[in-house]
Protein backbone atom coordinates (compact mmCIF):
# COMPACT_ATOMS: atom_id res chain seq x y z
CA UNK A 1 0.00 0.00 0.00
CA UNK A 2 1.33 3.42 -0.96
CA UNK A 3 2.34 5.52 2.06
CA UNK A 4 1.86 9.31 2.28
CA UNK A 5 4.85 11.41 1.30
CA UNK A 6 3.74 14.11 3.75
CA UNK A 7 1.58 13.39 6.78
CA UNK A 8 0.47 16.22 9.07
CA UNK A 9 -1.26 15.32 12.32
CA UNK A 10 -2.56 17.58 15.11
CA UNK A 11 -0.32 20.44 13.96
CA UNK A 12 -0.39 23.56 16.12
CA UNK A 13 1.50 26.74 15.25
CA UNK A 14 2.15 30.06 16.94
CA UNK A 15 3.36 33.53 15.97
CA UNK A 16 4.66 34.85 19.26
CA UNK A 17 1.77 34.45 21.69
CA UNK A 18 -0.80 34.12 18.91
CA UNK A 19 -2.04 30.52 18.55
CA UNK A 20 -2.89 30.28 14.81
CA UNK A 21 -3.13 26.55 14.02
CA UNK A 22 -5.38 24.39 16.17
CA UNK A 23 -4.76 20.78 15.18
CA UNK A 24 -4.29 20.62 11.41
CA UNK A 25 -4.62 17.15 9.85
CA UNK A 26 -4.00 16.13 6.23
CA UNK A 27 -1.80 13.97 4.05
CA UNK A 28 -0.36 14.05 0.55
CA UNK A 29 0.53 11.01 -1.51
CA UNK A 30 3.64 10.92 -3.74
CA UNK A 31 3.04 12.70 -7.04
CA UNK A 32 -0.14 14.48 -5.92
CA UNK A 33 -0.92 18.15 -6.26
CA UNK A 34 -3.05 19.19 -3.29
CA UNK A 35 -4.40 22.63 -2.41
CA UNK A 36 -5.21 24.33 0.85
CA UNK A 37 -8.27 26.52 0.33
CA UNK A 38 -9.81 28.96 2.77
CA UNK A 39 -10.54 32.57 3.57
CA UNK A 40 -7.84 35.02 4.53
CA UNK A 41 -6.66 34.24 8.04
CA UNK A 42 -7.72 30.59 7.93
CA UNK A 43 -4.14 29.44 8.58
CA UNK A 44 -3.05 28.29 5.11
CA UNK A 45 0.27 30.14 4.91
CA UNK A 46 1.00 29.39 8.57
CA UNK A 47 0.54 25.70 7.78
CA UNK A 48 3.24 25.89 5.09
CA UNK A 49 5.58 27.81 7.38
CA UNK A 50 4.94 25.37 10.24
CA UNK A 51 5.80 22.42 7.99
CA UNK A 52 9.06 24.19 7.12
CA UNK A 53 9.81 25.06 10.74
CA UNK A 54 9.77 28.83 10.26
CA UNK A 55 7.16 29.81 12.85
CA UNK A 56 7.92 30.81 16.43
CA UNK A 57 6.63 27.53 17.86
CA UNK A 58 4.92 24.41 16.59
CA UNK A 59 3.58 21.20 18.07
CA UNK A 60 2.19 17.98 16.67
CA UNK A 61 3.54 15.74 13.94
CA UNK A 62 4.83 16.46 10.43
CA UNK A 63 6.27 13.39 8.75
CA UNK A 64 8.12 13.43 5.43
CA UNK A 65 8.09 9.75 4.57
CA UNK A 66 9.39 8.05 7.69
CA UNK A 67 11.13 11.19 9.01
CA UNK A 68 9.57 13.33 11.72
CA UNK A 69 10.17 17.03 11.04
CA UNK A 70 8.97 18.51 14.32
CA UNK A 71 12.07 19.48 16.25
CA UNK A 72 14.25 19.91 13.16
CA UNK A 73 15.45 23.40 12.12
CA UNK A 74 14.30 24.72 8.76
CA UNK A 75 17.69 24.26 7.07
CA UNK A 76 17.67 20.55 7.96
CA UNK A 77 14.11 20.22 6.67
CA UNK A 78 15.07 21.82 3.35
CA UNK A 79 17.95 19.38 2.95
CA UNK A 80 15.51 16.48 3.19
CA UNK A 81 14.05 17.56 -0.16
CA UNK A 82 11.26 19.96 0.79
CA UNK A 83 11.18 23.50 -0.69
CA UNK A 84 9.05 26.54 0.14
CA UNK A 85 8.18 29.28 -2.35
CA UNK A 86 6.72 32.19 -0.32
CA UNK A 87 4.03 34.55 -1.55
CA UNK A 88 6.50 37.47 -1.43
CA UNK A 89 8.82 35.43 -3.74
CA UNK A 90 12.06 36.58 -2.11
CA UNK A 91 13.85 37.63 -5.29
CA UNK A 92 17.20 39.36 -4.69
CA UNK A 93 16.80 42.71 -6.43
CA UNK A 94 20.54 43.34 -6.89
CA UNK A 95 21.22 39.94 -8.51
CA UNK A 96 20.52 38.94 -12.11
CA UNK A 97 18.04 36.24 -13.05
CA UNK A 98 20.85 33.73 -13.50
CA UNK A 99 22.51 34.68 -10.21
CA UNK A 100 19.18 34.28 -8.40
CA UNK A 101 18.74 30.83 -9.95
CA UNK A 102 22.21 29.67 -8.94
CA UNK A 103 22.06 31.02 -5.39
CA UNK A 104 20.30 28.19 -3.48
CA UNK A 105 22.35 25.06 -2.81
CA UNK A 106 21.52 21.75 -4.46
CA UNK A 107 20.30 19.61 -1.57
CA UNK A 108 19.93 16.30 -3.40
CA UNK A 109 20.18 14.84 -6.91
CA UNK A 110 17.29 15.19 -9.36
CA UNK A 111 16.95 18.96 -9.57
CA UNK A 112 16.43 20.73 -12.86
CA UNK A 113 19.43 22.25 -14.58
CA UNK A 114 19.54 25.89 -15.60
CA UNK A 115 18.73 25.09 -19.24
CA UNK A 116 15.76 22.93 -18.19
CA UNK A 117 14.43 25.81 -16.09
CA UNK A 118 14.79 28.17 -19.05
CA UNK A 119 12.90 25.64 -21.21
CA UNK A 120 10.15 25.63 -18.59
CA UNK A 121 10.10 29.44 -18.38
CA UNK A 122 11.31 30.89 -21.71
CA UNK A 123 10.72 34.42 -20.37
CA UNK A 124 13.62 33.91 -17.97
CA UNK A 125 16.03 32.92 -20.74
CA UNK A 126 15.28 36.25 -22.42
CA UNK A 127 15.97 38.11 -19.14
CA UNK A 128 18.88 36.10 -17.74
CA UNK A 129 21.13 39.19 -17.39
CA UNK A 130 18.34 41.38 -16.04
CA UNK A 131 18.35 42.43 -12.41
CA UNK A 132 15.72 41.04 -10.10
CA UNK A 133 14.31 44.51 -9.47
CA UNK A 134 13.47 44.95 -13.17
CA UNK A 135 11.31 41.82 -13.48
CA UNK A 136 7.53 41.89 -13.74
CA UNK A 137 5.46 40.12 -11.09
CA UNK A 138 4.97 37.15 -13.38
CA UNK A 139 8.67 36.89 -14.15
CA UNK A 140 9.49 37.08 -10.45
CA UNK A 141 7.06 34.21 -9.77
CA UNK A 142 8.64 32.11 -12.53
CA UNK A 143 12.07 32.83 -11.08
CA UNK A 144 10.96 31.93 -7.56
CA UNK A 145 9.58 28.57 -8.73
CA UNK A 146 12.55 27.91 -11.00
CA UNK A 147 14.96 28.58 -8.14
CA UNK A 148 13.50 25.84 -5.92
CA UNK A 149 13.32 23.37 -8.82
CA UNK A 150 17.10 23.55 -9.12
CA UNK A 151 17.64 22.41 -5.53
CA UNK A 152 16.55 18.81 -6.08
CA UNK A 153 13.54 19.10 -3.76
CA UNK A 154 10.69 16.82 -4.84
CA UNK A 155 8.02 18.22 -2.50
CA UNK A 156 7.18 21.84 -3.28
CA UNK A 157 5.20 24.17 -1.01
CA UNK A 158 3.85 27.06 -3.09
CA UNK A 159 2.12 29.99 -1.40
CA UNK A 160 -0.31 31.91 -3.64
CA UNK A 161 1.70 31.54 -6.87
CA UNK A 162 -0.98 33.26 -9.00
CA UNK A 163 -1.65 36.22 -6.69
CA UNK A 164 -1.81 39.49 -8.64
CA UNK A 165 -0.71 37.98 -11.96
CA UNK A 166 -2.20 38.60 -15.40
CA UNK A 167 -4.44 35.80 -16.75
CA UNK A 168 -1.91 34.79 -19.42
CA UNK A 169 0.78 34.33 -16.74
CA UNK A 170 -1.66 32.39 -14.53
CA UNK A 171 -2.21 30.02 -17.46
CA UNK A 172 1.54 29.58 -17.83
CA UNK A 173 1.96 28.83 -14.12
CA UNK A 174 -0.86 26.28 -14.40
CA UNK A 175 0.81 24.59 -17.38
CA UNK A 176 4.06 24.47 -15.40
CA UNK A 177 2.40 22.82 -12.40
CA UNK A 178 0.76 20.20 -14.60
CA UNK A 179 4.12 19.47 -16.22
CA UNK A 180 5.82 19.14 -12.83
CA UNK A 181 3.14 16.67 -11.79
CA UNK A 182 3.83 14.59 -14.91
CA UNK A 183 7.52 14.60 -13.99
CA UNK A 184 6.80 13.21 -10.53
CA UNK A 185 6.93 16.29 -8.32
CA UNK A 186 4.57 16.52 -5.35
CA UNK A 187 3.01 19.94 -4.70
CA UNK A 188 1.19 21.49 -1.76
CA UNK A 189 -0.41 24.66 -3.04
CA UNK A 190 -2.02 27.50 -1.09
CA UNK A 191 -4.43 29.20 -3.43
CA UNK A 192 -7.29 31.70 -3.11
CA UNK A 193 -8.41 31.15 -6.71
CA UNK A 194 -10.20 27.81 -6.50
CA UNK A 195 -11.03 27.97 -10.21
CA UNK A 196 -7.30 27.93 -10.93
CA UNK A 197 -6.77 25.23 -8.28
CA UNK A 198 -9.32 23.03 -10.07
CA UNK A 199 -7.11 23.01 -13.18
CA UNK A 200 -4.03 21.62 -11.39
CA UNK A 201 -5.01 19.76 -8.20
CA UNK A 202 -6.05 16.22 -7.35
CA UNK A 203 -7.67 17.15 -4.04
CA UNK A 204 -8.54 20.22 -2.02
CA UNK A 205 -8.38 20.62 1.76
CA UNK A 206 -10.53 23.42 3.13
CA UNK A 207 -9.30 25.33 6.19
CA UNK A 208 -11.26 27.40 8.69
CA UNK A 209 -9.98 28.93 11.94
CA UNK A 210 -6.70 27.05 11.92
CA UNK A 211 -8.15 23.61 11.15
CA UNK A 212 -8.89 21.45 8.12
CA UNK A 213 -12.67 21.15 7.98
CA UNK A 214 -13.22 19.32 4.69
CA UNK A 215 -11.51 17.45 1.85
CA UNK A 216 -12.94 17.67 -1.66
CA UNK A 217 -11.61 15.46 -4.49
CA UNK A 218 -11.19 17.49 -7.64
CA UNK A 219 -13.67 15.24 -9.47
CA UNK A 220 -16.34 16.29 -6.96
CA UNK A 221 -15.56 20.01 -7.06
CA UNK A 222 -18.48 20.99 -9.29
CA UNK A 223 -20.95 19.10 -7.11
CA UNK A 224 -19.41 20.67 -3.99
CA UNK A 225 -19.60 24.24 -5.26
CA UNK A 226 -22.47 25.39 -2.95
CA UNK A 227 -20.63 24.39 0.22
CA UNK A 228 -17.33 25.67 -1.17
CA UNK A 229 -18.93 29.07 -1.72
CA UNK A 230 -20.07 28.97 1.92
CA UNK A 231 -16.57 28.08 3.10
CA UNK A 232 -14.86 30.76 1.03
CA UNK A 233 -17.50 33.47 1.23
CA UNK A 234 -17.66 33.97 -2.54
Image (cartoon, rainbow, N blue to C red):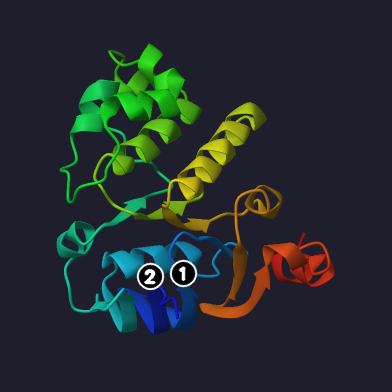
Image marks 1 and 2: residues in contact by CB distance under 8 Å: yes
Residue 53 in the image: above or below residue 98: below
Q: Circle 1 sits on which residue?
A: 29
* Residue at 57% over, 37% down: 175
Residue 112 position by quadrant:
top left
Residue 206, position in %: x, y? 62, 71
Image quarter where the N terminus lies is bottom left
Relative side of 153 to 182, left or right: left
The tag earlier along the polypeptide, 1 or 2, is 2
* Residue at 31% over, 16% down: 128
Residue 46 in the image: above or below residue 148: below
Residue 122, position in %: x, y? 44, 20
Residue 194 in the image: above or below residue 3: above
Relative side of 39 to 112, left or right: right
Query: Can residue 13 be seen here?
Result: yes
Q: Secondary structure at mark 2?
A: loop
Mark number, residue 5: 2
* Residue at 44% over, 52% down: 158
Residue 144, position in %: x, y? 36, 38
Residue 69 position by quadrant:
bottom left
Q: Secondary structure at mark 1?
A: loop
Residue 6 position by quadrant:
bottom left
Image quarter where the C terminus lies is bottom right
Amino acid sequence: MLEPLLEVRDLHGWYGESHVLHGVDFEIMPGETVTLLGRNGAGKTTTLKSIMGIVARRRGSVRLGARELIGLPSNRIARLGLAFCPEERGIFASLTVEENLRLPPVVQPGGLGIDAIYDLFPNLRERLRAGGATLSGGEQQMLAIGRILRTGARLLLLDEPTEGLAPVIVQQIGATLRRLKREGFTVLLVEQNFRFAATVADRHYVMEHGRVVDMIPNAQLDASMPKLHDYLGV
